[in-house]
Image (spheres, helix red, strand yellow):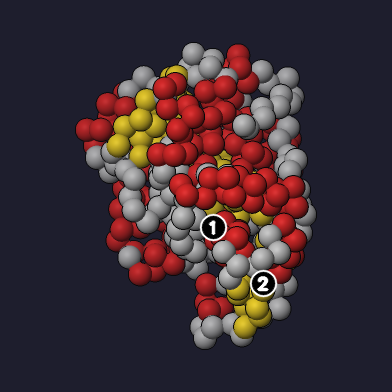
Amino acid sequence: MIKIKENNNMNMEKTFSGKRVLITGGLGFIGSNIAHALVQLGAQVTILDALLPLYGGNEFNVADIRDKIKVVIGDIRDEKTVNELVADRDYIFNLAAQVSYIDSINEPFLDLDINCLGHLRVLEAARKFAPQTKILFSSSRLAYGRIMTTPVDESHPTNPVSMYGVHKLAAEKYYRIYFETYGLKSATIHIPNPYGPRQQMKHNKYSIVGWFVRQALEGKEITIFGDGKQERDYLYIDDIVSAFLKVAASEKTDGEIYNIGTHERVCFVDMVDAILAEVPTGKKVHIPWPKNYERNETGNYVADTRKIKRAVGWEATVPLKAGIAQTVAYFKQNKEHYW
């Protein structure tokens, strides 16, 4: 169960109780965890999810709250469906996406279709049928591209090195334009490397932490390119949910972009070691970097989170070791629903 903590006098239950909320991609990892939190807070939650085979949509993710929410199987690219579901919503958490930067290279038009056209559908529907709503958009650290300075703040240059990053950045610009032109309230959150319960575990194209947890639980090798010393922000799902809810609840965040992260400065190999400490049946193997892989390598990433802390008092609270332990425990108990 996700723990809701108040900070900066934000009364989350007062904010969300009775509110009509739409979560696109709500059967996926982040969306389903947000749904659980909002149900606890008394919101009227509707989920829209296309259950596309390669992505994280999983009906088990909401099995224990299924009688408290409405689930619509549909696509954010479908104008009629989106118009009907967006109408009169108080909040929209727009999380539906093509989630693999690897697939964005091989299928750029699909990535464009979902991650750009799909979000324009939602924005247009909100402009026409829910001008009072507030929309939360889940973007990615990959919108920045190669990292020039760390920690990375929101003024860092944006030069993506993948189609996924380009389309995420384009969507960020859509939200900004709709805010400045039409007054449509929105906020964007840059998510680094998310992990935790209800994550997609079928393949390695989305969550590297989740995939490594599966490899370890199956007694397989975890492959590390080079020495594994590249730094990353690995952020536990409860902290991600908290960030989305706090930003949604504050009027000060309208039109803004926020980085979230942990400040732990964890190396890739340290993340692997944390998994193996919890699941010693796995093992790690170092291999050379694949040829031309550096084209997509962005460099060390550690988020500067001072902006979101000033705005809503958010900061990460779950250290990597504790988050890994909770993640492993969840999948040990529920692995038949995710493998």
Distance CA(mark 1)–CA(mark 2): 18 Å
Residue at 50% over, 68% down: 161
Q: Residues within 10 Å of mark 2 (few under 14, many from 20)?
A: some
The residue at which mark 1 appears reads as: 207
Residue 54 on image: x %, y %: 37, 56
Q: Nearer the viewer, mark 1 or mark 2?
A: 2
The residue at which mark 2 appears reads as: 283
Q: Secondary structure at mark 1?
A: loop
Q: Secondary structure at mark 2?
A: strand
Q: Is residue 182 left or right of residue 292?
A: left
Amino acid at the residue labelled 1: Ser
* Residue 180 visible within the image: no
Figure quadrant of the N terminus: top right
Q: Pick the residue in front: 325 or 234.
A: 325
Q: Earlier in the sequence, mark 1 or mark 2?
A: 1
The quadrant holding residue 305 is: top right
* Residue 156 visible within the image: yes
Q: Pick the residue in front: 118 or 23.
A: 23
Q: Is residue 29 left or right of residue 242?
A: left
Q: Is residue 39 left or right of residue 129?
A: right
Residue at 57% over, 20% down: 41
Q: Is residue 47 above or below residue 190?
A: above
Residue at 61% over, 17% down: 13
Residue 5 on image: x %, y %: 71, 27
